[in-house]
Amino acid sequence: MSAGLEWTRPLGLVALLLPLLVWLLSIRPGKPRPLASGTVSLWRRLQGASRGERRLRRVPPARRWLLAALVCGALALGGPRRARHPVAPTWRVLIDATPSMFLPLAGGGTRIEAAVAALRSLARQRGAHLSWQRAGTGEAPRPELPDEWLAAPLPGAREVRFEAYDQPGTVWLTDRAGELAPRYAGLCASGGEAVPGPVDVTGGRLLIWDGEELVEGDPVAPRRVAFDPALPPAVLAALRAWALSRGWTLEGSGRPALELSGVSGG
């Protein structure tokens, strides 16, 4: 590439040897220049030319056009085009903001911090820009990653369905690849050790992750929920149904596990 030009087929320039060969075969001595020889001085002027030192060697005009056509053809075979300056790509990063991403790693830091660091390193190597978006929120991508996104999980975040974001220029950022197999998008997973512990309460019993599968744990005492009696009757009825469907109790004394009240005005 030179002067803003690059050759897409540089081997085609080998064809320049053909016009060079034609030029070498076409040059021939020029005809002697006619001079009157009526005086001795003119003979003296021709003395050196008699050895062939001043004879011209030239290419016939018709072949000059042939040489020009051959040169142009050889340059065309080289595939010249304007040099294109590469544009840095932008990767849209979809972040898994579920609680597991904020578990600590054995080497220090959290899973989300490790995944972000790995992706930033790869982006620097590829000269790519990053835009950040929490998957499943409908938020617009941001040019900078907010610090609070690395501090705590997204409230109410559930398992991300990355399959809906399988697009070129998109990177899925999570902790465990599992069965994820993007066709067009990229994937960056931090990994991490299994973290056993309770994850839910089902049917009055703990649901425990033992590192390999979910198992039932010990029974748990019913948790009490309290409502503000000033709430409208329809709202109270809906809240009672919601609490009972989840195994909460409305009776008992002491501090409730959850207390719901209304807000006046607005």
Image (spheres, rainbow, N blue to C red):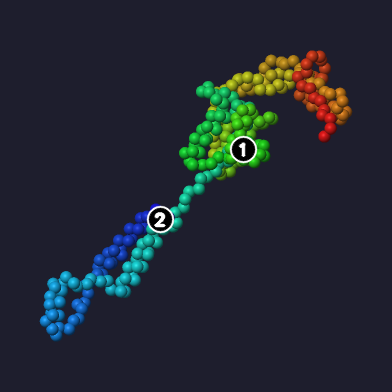
**Residue 219, image x and y in percent?**
71, 15
| Residue at (81, 14) in percent of width and height | 253
| Res 215 seen here | no
Q: Quadrant of residue 235?
A: top right
- Mark 2 and mark 1 lie on one chain; the one further toward the N terminus is 2
Q: How many marks?
A: 2
Q: Nearer the viewer, residue 167 or 181?
A: 167
- Residue 3, label in figure: 2
- Give the vertical position of 72 relative to 87 (above or below): below
Binning the other alpha carbons within 10 Å of mark 2 as few (below 14), some (14 to 19) or many (20 upward) gives few
| Residue at (13, 83) in percent of width and height | 39
> In this image, 230 relative to 178: left or right?
right
- Residue 9, label in figure: none
Residue on which disc 1 sits: 133
Which residue lies most toward the front here? 41
* Alpha carbon separation for disc pair 2 and 1: 41 Å
| Residue at (32, 61) in percent of width and height | 16
Binning the other alpha carbons within 10 Å of mark 1 as few (below 14), some (14 to 19) or many (20 upward) gives many
Under mark 1, the amino acid is: Gln
SS state under label 2: loop
Which residue lies most toward the bottom here? 38
> In this image, 182 relative to 205: left or right?
left
Under mark 2, the amino acid is: Ala
| Res 214 seen here | yes
**Residue 262, image x and y in percent?**
82, 28
> In this image, 21 relative to 200: left or right?
left
Q: Quadrant of residue 207?
A: top right
> In this image, 206 relative to 172: left or right?
right
SS state under label 1: strand
Q: Nearer the viewer, residue 93 or 142?
A: 142
Callouts 2 and 1 close, C-beta under 8 Å: no
Quadrant where the image shows the C terminus:
top right
